[in-house]
Amino acid sequence: MAAGAFAAARERYFALEAELLSDCAQGSTVDSVEDLVNAGGRELLLAMLQAFLDVRAQRERRAEAAPVGADGAARTRVEKDHSRKLISRFGPVRIQRMAYRAPNAANLHLADLELNLPTGAHSHTLRREVTAEATRGSFDDAVAAVERATGQKIGKRQAVELARSAATDVAAFYAQPRLEVASAGRILVLQFDGKGIMMRPEGLRPATAKAAQARRNRLSTRLSPGEKSNRKRMAEIAVVHDATPAPRAVDDVLPLPGRVNAQAGGPARARGPKATGKWLTASVVDDIATVIAAGFDEAERRDPHHQRTWVVLVDGNNTQIDAIQAEAARRRVTVHVLVDFVHVTEYVWTAAWSFFETGDPHAETWVRTQLRQILRGKAPAVAAGIGRRATNNHYNAQERRGADTVAAYLKAKAPYLGYGTALANGWPIATGVVEGTCRFMIKDRFDITGARWGLEGAESLLLLRAVVTNGDFDAYWAYHLDQEQQRNHYSKLAPLDTAA
């Protein structure tokens, strides 16, 4: 029985062997022979897979007890040779299996459960190939890469749907209990940021969609001065990582000009803490508070008893800060919130152009002096000094606008500019990790020229890219297959105690 089923596979093998032994092949270049083996090998593997399925169908035996569906009806009748198609990574195959039947009830196929067949035409292995490639580049590139690797042609729309369905279980996967991953002596760092994704109109948030509609009533070919396009929806990104404390001084972060150009042999500048054990999540569907809560979930998994130092870095977004403080209060954990020092630097440069002409080298000296004071924890004094300088120079409202904006910013953010404490304790003071994540997660994949995203598709790709970046893709896919088996097959059967 089995020997006959595999006869076609053996014929393909011997045909390929004969072709490789032929004078034509023996006189060919290795690359052409490699292509020959690749094409012939796919045909051979397809024949072997079909033979396996044929043998399995021949050996299938009727279940001793009639299976009971989730509807409570026992399937007492059996019909053989119910067929379905499956597109594997080697090509299409036919699967024959028994159908368990009852009047006015859907058929049950126990073989489908045992094989964990997908509901659609494409095998789980092929779906994995598509999903992995879709997280790397455009769907056009993903389709082309899958065809090169497997020889199977998949439409772009199909690829989108396969990737979307592959992300179904990401939230549940990360909701599972996991073990502690870092020692209590390390800093626990949380970083949050947002990045816009170009959306189709139906994917915009209500306020943005309203603004976009108002924009359509203006110029049709270009934006008016100062007008925003209102085509993006913000995705929120959370990164959690560990770090060993690395105390530094102000000179290590922002040395005086003499130290900047110091020759080799001088004292080395201390480096900041290095991020390890990075984990991230992102969403274009959930709001800021929900993504921040997910970041806190991961932090609490790593430090369930709140024994470590929690440092939270943001770019100054008030909504983020409010959500962080609310989440910390809810969990009764102490967090040290810091505004990214690079953002503060940009603000101080804005004030500089209220006092200096563009390109004036004295502006750089002045900015460095202010920033060194801020690093020492003296942001309120710097804010007061900026306002005082504008007043003493008798600037009018227009001339001092930049200075007043920066002074107000420094005063408002003063509680989150404790860089003196951060440097002394060896904490990070910049959001480079989450900003790098934003570039990778959003810009490198979603900012492809001409791309416009639907909400569900964008969310699916974000979740999958997070899984890949976290190094969890293999574990996630195993979990996803278990969930697929439950959804597609076990859910159609009555629970065991009911069936008994």
Image: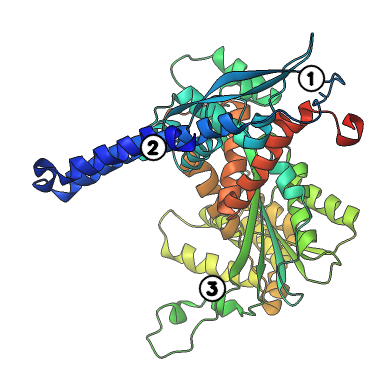
Res. 377 visible in picture: no
Label for residue 75?
1
Which is more toward the observer, 318 or 4? 4
At label 1, the amino acid type is Arg
Label for residue 254?
3
Which is more toward the observer, 54 or 297? 54
- Residue 126 in percent (x, y) is at 49, 36
Q: CA distance from mark 1 to mark 2?
A: 39 Å
Discs 2/3, front: 2
Q: Residues within 10 Å of mark 1 (few under 14, many from 20)?
A: many
Q: CA distance from mark 3 to mark 1?
A: 76 Å
The residue at the point 67 percent across, 46 percent down is 479
Q: Is residue 111 left or right of residue 12?
A: right
Q: Is residue 268 left or right of residue 15?
A: right
At label 2, the amino acid type is Thr
Q: Which residue is mark 2?
A: 150
Figure quadrant of residue 487: top right
Res. 333 visible in picture: yes
Of callouts 1 and 2, the N-terminal one: 1
Discs 1/2, front: 1
Figure quadrant of residue 195: top right
Q: Secondary structure at mark 1?
A: loop
Q: Residues within 10 Å of mark 3 (few under 14, many from 20)?
A: some
At label 3, the amino acid type is Leu
Q: CA distance from mark 2 to mark 3?
A: 53 Å
Q: Secondary structure at mark 3?
A: loop
In contact (CB < 8 Å): disc 1 and disc 2: no
- Residue 495 in percent (x, y) is at 86, 33
The residue at the point 50 percent across, 78 percent down is 256
Q: Secondary structure at mark 2?
A: helix
Of callouts 3 and 1, the N-terminal one: 1
Label for residue 446?
none
